[in-house]
Image (spheres, grey):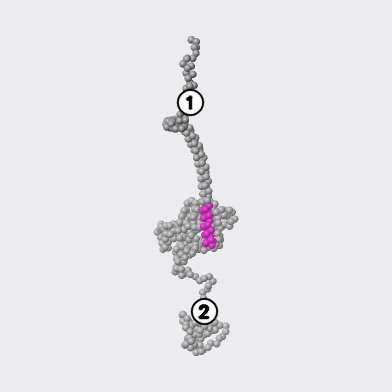
Amino acid sequence: MPPYAGPPVASRSGDAASPLRLLAYLALAITLIVLDDQAGWLARLREQANSLVQPVWALAGLPGKLGNQVKDSAASHSQLVTENRELRNQLLLANARLTRLQTAALDNAQLRELLNVAERSGLDVQLAPILDIDLDPVKQRLVLDAGSREGVHVGQAVIDAGGLMGQVISVTGGTSTVLLLTDPDHAVPVTVARNGVRLIVYGRGDTLELRDIPLSAGVEVGDEIVTSGLGGRFPAGFPVGTITGLRPDDTHAFLVGELKPAAQLDRGRDVLLLRPGAAIRIPPNLRLQMEQSAPGGPADATALPTGTAPAATQPSPVVPAAGRQQPSSQTRTVAPASSLTPAPSARPPQQEGGSPPAGSTGVPAAGRQPTTPEAQR
């Protein structure tokens, strides 16, 4: 390998000329800057250069933009999930509150109806909440949260705002069992409010049934059925149901009617218990219907006011038969007939039936003894 002979001569001359070249470039740059600042010679060139470099800048910033978008999307998704979860929980709580408010509103409306019924009818009632309910085709019963300690007794009638519900059949210290009208073992004596026909309603598990309706009874679909009060168990005038259908029985000698109960047997949370000796007032419209359907119309149902007695009729003097002595403890002198006959102008008119008026004297027939009011007394 030959020995190193040093750098070439050309490179040494070039190194000597590089400061001059640098100074020339600096002078040119300063000149261009001054000219561009004063006259704007390079503005067009700069705009073209920017337009050429713009895609490069966009490509250079694309990864950063994509990264920011991914980061923002992930953050917004997690935030949306959290907000959605919170809103769902708030919705559940709001629905629960709304359900409770609706239930309370229904309870208040039912209690208001019960109290209005008791106030309008003038009933001595007792409010009892429903503790349990047993509604099946074989057994229709309620369990009330009121027993003997609250004064409940067997046979007590149970009503609601619509009408009669049933009767109490068993009582314990704190609870009582009610047999509903629709129970197959239950029967109620009723009457048709329109014409007063007396019938009996039987339970059928879910509806009520009228049996052995005479063909001549004039019962029609839509008639209202109320309690008749017979038997002393249920007071008269309480709505029982409305006839929804009529059909002949197997013998075609009687009719069978289906009733829709007036009471809401499957709804509500409270009932009313009628206390013994409750004052019952039949509604005016029902009373008017019963009076109009009575024989002879409302005129026959009109009675005298309480405490008014019919005027007593004063008896007319009776002429005793001839030869019969007047039954009296004293012997009275009877005037002759000529002295008892009044003048024709002063003769009073006779009462209906031919008897002389009270306090007047009559002319005795031939062969009979005359009499006076004192003698008749």
Q: Name the residue under label 2.
A: 314
Q: Please state the extent of the stretch shown in magenta in the rendering.
A: 104-123
Q: Nearer the viewer, mark 2 or mark 1?
A: 1
SS under mark 1: helix
Asked whether 338 or 287 is in front, the reply is 287
* Residue 254: % across, % down: 42, 60
116 within the magenta span: yes
Give me the C-alpha separation between circle 2 and circle 1. Answer: 157 Å
* Residue 16: % across, % down: 49, 18
Left or right of 3, for residue 253: left
At x 42%, y 32%, the residue is: 44
| Residue at the extreme top | 2
SS under mark 2: loop
At x 46%, y 58%, the residue is: 241
Asked whether 182 or 16 is in front, the reply is 16
Q: Name the residue under label 1.
A: 26
Which residue type carries mark 1? Answer: Leu
Badge 2: residue crowd in 10 Å (few <14, some 14–19, many ≥20): few
| Residue at the extreme left | 252
Asked whether 268 or 34 is in front, the reply is 34
Which residue type carries mark 2? Answer: Gln
* Residue 2: % across, % down: 48, 10
Q: Quadrant of residue 328?
A: bottom right
Quarter the C terminus occupies: bottom right
Asked whether 353 or 282 is in front, the reply is 282
* Residue 177: % across, % down: 54, 54
Left or right of 204, for residue 124: right
Q: Is residue 61 depicted above or below 88 in this figure? A: above
187 within the magenta span: no
